[in-house]
Amino acid sequence: MSRVRRFRNSNFQLALLYAGLFTTSILVLFALTYRTAADYAAQDEADEIDVEFVAIQDEAHLAGDGYLPQIIANHLRQRSSEHAAYLLEDAAGQRLAGNIAARAPQLGPQNLRVPVDGQWRELRAHGYRLANGDYVLIGQDPRALRDMKHLIARAFSVNAAITLLLAVLGGVIISSRALRRVDALGRTTQAIVAGDLSRRLPLRGTDDEIDRLSANVNAMLDRIEDLMRSVRQVSNDVAHDLRTPLTRLRQRLEQARRRGDATPQELREVLEGAITQVDSILETFGALLRIAQIEAGGRRRARTTLDISALLSGVVEDFAPAAADRGQLLLAEVTPGLQLSGDREQLTQMLVNLLDNAIRHSGAGARIVVSAHASTAALEIVVADTGPGIPAPERDNVLRPFYRLESSRTTEGSGLGLSLVAVIAKQHGATLALADNGPGLRVTIKFVKNGAAARRSDAHVTLSDAFVQR
Amino acid sequence: MRILVIEDDAETAAYLQGGLQEEGHVVTLAADGRNGLMLAATGDFDVLVVDRMLPGLDGLAVVRTLRASSVGTPALFLTTMSGIDDRVTGLDAGADDYLVKPFAFSELAARVKALGRRPRATAATTTVLRVADLELDLIKRTVRRAGQPIALQPREFRLLEYLMRHAGEVVTRTMLLENVWDYHFDPRTNIVESHLSRLRTKVEKGFAPELIHTLRGAGYCLREPG
Ligand SMILES: Nc1ncnc2c1ncn2[C@@H]1O[C@H](COP(=O)(O)OP(=O)(O)OP(=O)(O)O)[C@@H](O)[C@H]1O
Ligand SMILES: [Mg+2]
């Protein structure tokens, strides 16, 4: 962990900020304490001077004013160690006693800077006027005040130093622990980036922000891993399902080449067969791409509110003759005027695929009904036929790309029709359900009203989703 | 017809040129968009075949530029399967038709012919289409054969209208799906064939000669006898 990183680390910055805040509040507290204490000490000192003056006054009262110089001298002697200053002047300003030089009388509290005991000193003093007109000045060293100030200042600085030290230390400890965690996350992420998709971010189980973030990232990784797995599955399926017809095509062409005596007519037939086969492979590709396109374009495409009843009836009309040609009856039982927000082309394709299935997978004599009705909450489109239907255990399987029932092997198709239906339904926030029609297949597509737009974001489907269902 | 093919892939270009020349067209090739645009701007062509993906100036820009400088030569847009909205953007840019690669040559040939003979100007003023003794009134939406009224379903009417507008031309199944049904995909169920056989029964049965012909592997054609 480099120095730069430590100082850039947000936790450390936070620790510093706290230390700063702490120090500031201590400073404010100190200033307040200092003021109060100083005021108190100053008052104390003033009181002390007053007491001294009153004592001098009392003694003069007992002994007579004439003894004032002696009294002052006595007091001076008693406090010789305290660097106190005394001055007695008569009304004319003549100095009568004391240890400082005569000066212009000034009454009340004052600061004094005088030489006492051979040294210049800053003293707190008070000037008094006696009844006989004499002037008395008493000054003393404000040592209590100074001591108190020193004490407070020292207490503060020690305190502040300890606080700062603790804050910084705490910050470093916290931040290095957080950094260690972030480093661990970083290492895991790098391993994932390097290709190990099975790795997950470590959780501490404390449910703090980092834990929750990690859990989210892990969920995302789960999803990505799922998608990757299904993409692999897709390519395997595609590879497999295209290899079969390509192999057959190759065999056919090779056979034709081996037969040296083939007539032009025969060769022509082989070529035509080959083209048909290539076309069917291309068709499979086309269908796969279409599925991919729908899921890719689903979000971008402009949806319009369309008359789904008209759309259904129209498609039924288009397919009715083809059904009739196979001896089937195709009917629409649609509530007129139903509105739905969606992509016209996709919805048309969805219905076409279902009708295709109903017509091609159920035999002659089948009855195929397309119905649509709406309740206040949902709109349902049902395509039901009376053909052989799909056995219950296979109903999920047939939604998978390329999956076809054993019984349909002889019917042409690539097994992508229902996958496309599933993707279109999901893109529209609709559910797709296959059920027994007793007999036959009953496909229900249910659109939840007004929910389609809101659900679209969480119902994002990918080609791989169709595969994940397996 | 004089056809300009703007296609950068040499093999595809040669394939298109050979095939179209066999059909009796005069084909000019341009290997990139800029060249193609310059040639097309002369207005010396009846049909343009423009690939979507071109080096330099792409097909979309070529068509858009031509239309902006009021060169109205019909253009057929060639797109790939993976071009999601190419059809829409191509038609928006001013192309008249589109075809997804890979395609059967017969499909391209039919579409080029249809584009080259597109009834322009006259289409707006024509109210009655006539082929031999078959008559289709676009305003009254009625059909008569040899003077006898024939009742058609709306879809059958549109199908017949399209065939008559392209009388004498081959129309393919996908052309019909796109223009009559507005299906831009090919359902496995052959709905065109079923509708056509019904239309035939109504329009041809009891009448002679036969007007609607099926051309195996190519499409359909409604044409005057002889
Ligand atoms: N209406 C139905 N009745 C009976 N079986 C059905 C029906 N619809 C689908 N199936 C079965 O489900 C399988 C998958 O259907 P799907 O539409 O995906 O593919 P397909 O129809 O075989 O081919 P494609 O749709 O690509 O032409 C079908 O092969 C068929 O076995
Ligand atoms: Mg199908």
Image (spheres, rainbow, N blue to C red):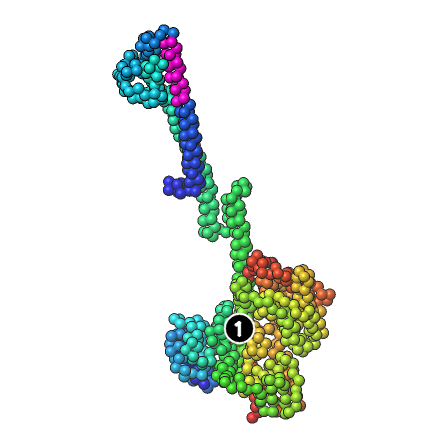
Going by the numbered disc 1, the residue's amino acid type is Val
Q: Nearer the viewer, residue A103 or B189?
A: A103
* Residue range of the region highlighted in magenta in the rendering: A41-61
Please tell me in which quadrant of the rendered image residue B7 appears.
bottom left
The residue that appears at 41% across and 27% down in the rendered structure is A35
Is B211 placed above or below A433 here?
below
Q: Nearer the viewer, residue A314 or A148?
A: A148
Q: Nearer the viewer, residue B33 or A402?
A: B33
- Report x, y in % for residue A141: 34, 19
Residue that mark 1 sits on:
A278
The residue that appears at 40% across and 74% down in the rendered structure is B33
- Report x, y in % for residue A126: 35, 19
Secondary structure that dominates the magenta span: helix
Please tell me in which quadrant of the rendered image residue A67 appears.
top left
**Horizontal relation, residue A368 to residue B91: left or right:** right
**Horizontal relation, residue A398 to residue B38: left or right:** right
User: Mark 1, chain letter?
Assistant: A
Mark 1: secondary structure: helix
> In the orientation shown, which residue stands out farthest toward the right?
A438
Is residue B27 in view?
no
> In the orientation shown, which residue stands out farthest toward the top?
A63
The residue that appears at 55% across and 73% down in the rendered structure is B184
Quadrant of image for the C terminus of chain A: bottom right
- Report x, y in % for residue A165: 41, 32
